[in-house]
Image: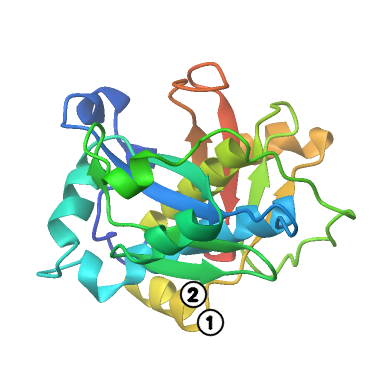
Amino acid sequence: MNNDSTPVTESPFRSEPGERDLAPQFVLPLVVRIERAAPPARTDALETAARAVLVLLADARASGEGEWAEAVRDWQDARIRKVVRRARGAEWRRAEALPGITVTGRDAEIRVFPPVPLDGWPRELAKLQVSGTDLDDPEPPAAADPAAPVLWMSPEVAMSAGKAMAQAGHGAQLAWWELSDAERAAWRDAGFPLSVRTAPPADWTRLTAGGLPVVRDAGFTEVAPDTCTVVADHPALR
């Protein structure tokens, strides 16, 4: 595990869950564009969601005295909740008009917004649907590049695309928190390359027990509490 410097933010990978449950709860909104005629591929959407989280964390507005910094600190002091909603047409245009960052993949478009209180969503986003994000890959994704970060999804848990996008974002965030400042900068400057793949069943136990950051879901939706959903396999953390 990397020990070059202490991460700026304490990682929940190394803290007791109860500490964060007691703090006021915030959520990071992500909106995926899903047009009827051209929905994105599932893996592309998962990878773009993970990059969107990293892009927000690395943005100058999210740290120091930046305009989003207080919201990001409040969110990171609690559970790192993320909610993915879908939009198309006029809904997407209204979402784009709000402060945030749009990140694109091969075909996927995802807009990430600064965190909001759990019950304090902007009206334009609160109207958007959570369901309906069931996406497919038209063909199996290529093998992951072992020299780049890989977010390994559990082969044992079935999740909707929206849920899996949030989990991929969690995994990317845990990896970010474990990196040194220099390693974060290198990842950012490279454009946050990463892959999201389902782990081979035979490798899952090794991955979850290997000391890498592991996402353990709180169990609010779709999966049971404390389910291991993602392992963040960044080369600097092996």
| 51 lies above or below 22 | below
Q: Quadrant of residue 48?
A: bottom right
Judged left or right of residue 132, residue 94 is left
Identify which residue, 110 or 66, lies in the foreground: 110
What percent of the width, then of the height, locates residue 170? 47, 45
| 101 lies above or below 188 | above
What percent of the width, then of the height, locates residue 90? 48, 58
Q: How many marks?
A: 2
Judged left or right of residue 212, residue 43 is right
For label 1, the residue is 190
What percent of the width, then of the height, locates residue 181? 33, 72
**Residue at the limit of the structure toward the bottom, as seen here:** 189
Q: Does residue 212 show up?
A: no
**Of the residues shown, which amino acid type is indicated by label 2?**
Trp
For label 2, the residue is 187
Marks 2 and 1 close (CB-CB < 8 Å):
yes
Q: Residue at x 17, y 45 (%)?
A: 74
Q: Residue at x 88, y 53 (%)?
A: 140
- Within 10 angstroms of label 2, few (less than 14), some, or many (20 or more) residues? some
**Of the residues shown, which amino acid type is indicated by label 1?**
Ala
Judged left or right of residue 69, residue 238 is right
Identify which residue, 48 or 88, lies in the foreground: 88
Q: Residue at x 19, y 62 (%)?
A: 68
Q: Residue at x 57, y 22 (%)?
A: 222
What percent of the width, then of the height, locates residue 88? 56, 55
